[in-house]
Amino acid sequence: MFDRRYTADCRIYNMLAAAPRHLSFHTPGHKEGKWDITELSFSDNLACPAGVLKAAQEDVAKILGAARSFLLTDGSTCGVHSMLYAAGVKKLVFSAAAHKSVYNGCRLLGIEPIVLPVRYAGSVPLQPSPESIAFALQNAGMERGNGSVGVLLTSPDYYGNIADYAAVRRICEACGALLLCDGAHGGHLHGTPLYAGGYCDLWVDGVHKSLPAFTQGAVVSARTEALGARLAASVDIFRTTSPSYPVLASVEYAVKYPRKLQSERAAERLKERLHARSNADWTKVVVCYGKNAFAVQEALEKQGIYPEFCDGENILFYLSPAQPLRQFKALERALQSFEGLRVNEQNETPMPAFTAGERGEKTEWILLRESAGHICAGDAGLFPPCLPVVREGQVIEGEHIEKLSAAKSVYGLIEGKIAVYI
Ligand SMILES: Cc1ncc(COP(=O)(O)O)c(C=O)c1O
């Protein structure tokens, strides 16, 4: 995975490459110790870094424009939880189209979620407007600047939409709210005006999604030294005590990976030719096939082309700066034969209603197909993008059942059953 043209200043990779061959009487148990090692005398210790990991983290912080950054091998999920703990807020304003880690983080940490309804363009969720955030903050008592509320943006989101960071930052500053960003899909944007780090107090970069890092590689960063100190204590709680060195090396490598302007331009041209949805993030190519989307996905897979996901109407093709341009062309060729099935769907549609129901004392698992009218006892959605289709406390409706039943991969269901209150 590591391209030797770009490893010269990758400290962790070079430390591993130079590691002495040795007899391993240490973990891991596969005993093929060289790349996949544990904390040894030369490999530093992520929990208390003083050598190569400290230097790599400092490099990463500098590149990302942070006071402090922390390498993670537990995915953006760990970054989101660490960030929420470090923020120390009592209430959090975020869009309903947030990842399950945000909902779960609130549950774990006793943070009251203030969930903004999602606006849609056709079937694609949009970013919340700055006005809706200001309104929610006002309702949460933030006009008095009580310092206990945060705003969390998910930006860019899976569909490549990017928040109006500058406007939201102004709103947060005016009332003393912390601004957080789940940038699980934005690691490739540092150094550009679209990067969350230019505006947020705490933010996560899920570098494994859009940059060449191994799965689970992520970074969480803080804007100030004071928040950095809180984040250091926080990652110590949520991070594994056995971080994978190959993943750590890949995170540093990914953050230092050069920007490929040629790929970015080619991606924008590709989107135009495919009539993909317009979005601000070049790595996300979203094409709408309406009710034929699953069939198109299946046909593509038969040709050996695997997209990131299909949400039942749109298919997301995820690009990366490490991807050869000939693959962009292969995608274009393959999609040409489905052009007749593509749907033009850009209009703003009304928000789906959230009908809250009364929570019972107990819960039970019932068949999804028989759950209409029951009150959902845990979030359930498509996996990915891991956004809830139906949320805890919501009345389950026919359209939720239809969407979850059609999906190939879901969360929050077990063997066709969903948890409801009784
Ligand atoms: C918006 C968003 N946030 C957080 C995550 C969690 O990332 P990870 O799977 O790296 O823990 C995801 C994963 O899909 C995501 O889409």
Image (cartoon, rainbow, N blue to C red):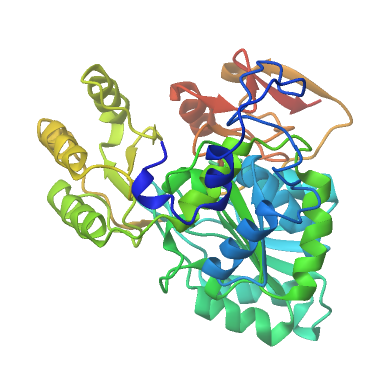
Name the quadrant containing residue 4.
top left
Closer to the camera in the image, 402 or 412: 412
Closer to the camera in the image, 130 or 86: 86
Residue ID at (83%, 63%) = 90
Image position of 398 (left or right of 68): left
In the image, farthest residue toward the right: 361
In the image, farthest residue toward the top: 415
Closer to the camera in the image, 206 or 9: 9
Q: Position of residue 317 (x, y in %)?
A: 32, 40
Name the quadrant containing residue 332.
top left
Q: Position of residue 324 (x, y in %)?
A: 23, 42
**In which quadrant is the N terminus drawn?**
top left
Name the quadrant containing residue 212.
top left
Q: Is residue 279 visible?
A: yes
Q: Position of residue 247 (x, y in %)?
A: 57, 39
Image position of 45 (left or right of 62): right
Residue ID at (62%, 76%) = 134
Closer to the camera in the image, 215 or 3: 3
| Picture layout, residue 384 above or below residue 230 | above
Q: Quadrant of ligand 1?
A: top right
Q: Position of residue 117 (x, y in %)?
A: 57, 57
Q: Is residue 356 visible?
A: no
